Image (cartoon, rainbow, N blue to C red):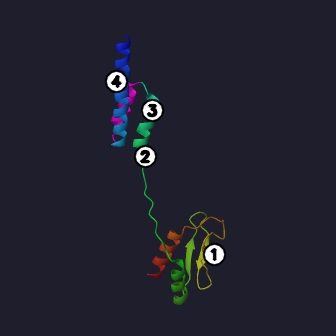
Amino acid sequence: MQANLFWVRLVTFVRLTVAKHLITAGRFEDAAKLYEQLGMYAEAGKVRAKGSEIKIKKTEVSVDLNSLLREVKEGGIIVVYRCPHCGGKLKVGKDTSVDSLKHCEHCGSEIEAMDLADFIKTALS
């Protein structure tokens, strides 16, 4: 009887180890099936969910808003940027400072520097 219990535990241990290796290899569905065979349905669900996750890598990019504002001032133009949160108009012209562009003057939402920089670059080109 003890020998039988030993084999059951050994097989379970091996299957769990294989399932972990399958997860490491990115074979989430195969790992989930092994967990289901072991009666570990919650773990199978977690592994399947992990397989459907979308990973996004964040890349740091620096933007010199001061130089873009300098170009706007030197060009004597006014650029109207719409806040993505409330749609309020934010005028970027000769008297605009970088600090005044950090938050929307209408709703107070934070303005993404990259979005603003892309918009100003487009307006200048």
Q: Which mark is first along the chain, 1 or 2?
A: 2
Query: Residue at image x 63%, y 69%?
Result: 104
Question: What amino acid is labelled 4 in the image?
Answer: Val
Residue hosting label 1: 100
Of tags 4 and 2, the one toward the viewer is 4
Q: Give the range drawn in magenta.
A: 26-38
Neighbours of disc 4 within 10 Å: few (<14), some (14-19), many (20+): few
Quadrant position of the N terminus in the picture: top left
Neighbours of disc 3 within 10 Å: few (<14), some (14-19), many (20+): some
For marks 4 and 3, give the CA distance. 18 Å
Q: Which mark is first along the chain, 3 or 4?
A: 4
Residue hosting label 4: 11
Q: Which mark is residue 43?
A: 3
Q: Position of residue 125 (x, y in %)?
A: 43, 81
The extreme top residue here reads 1
Q: Is label 4 in contact with label 3 (beta carbons under 8 Å)?
A: no
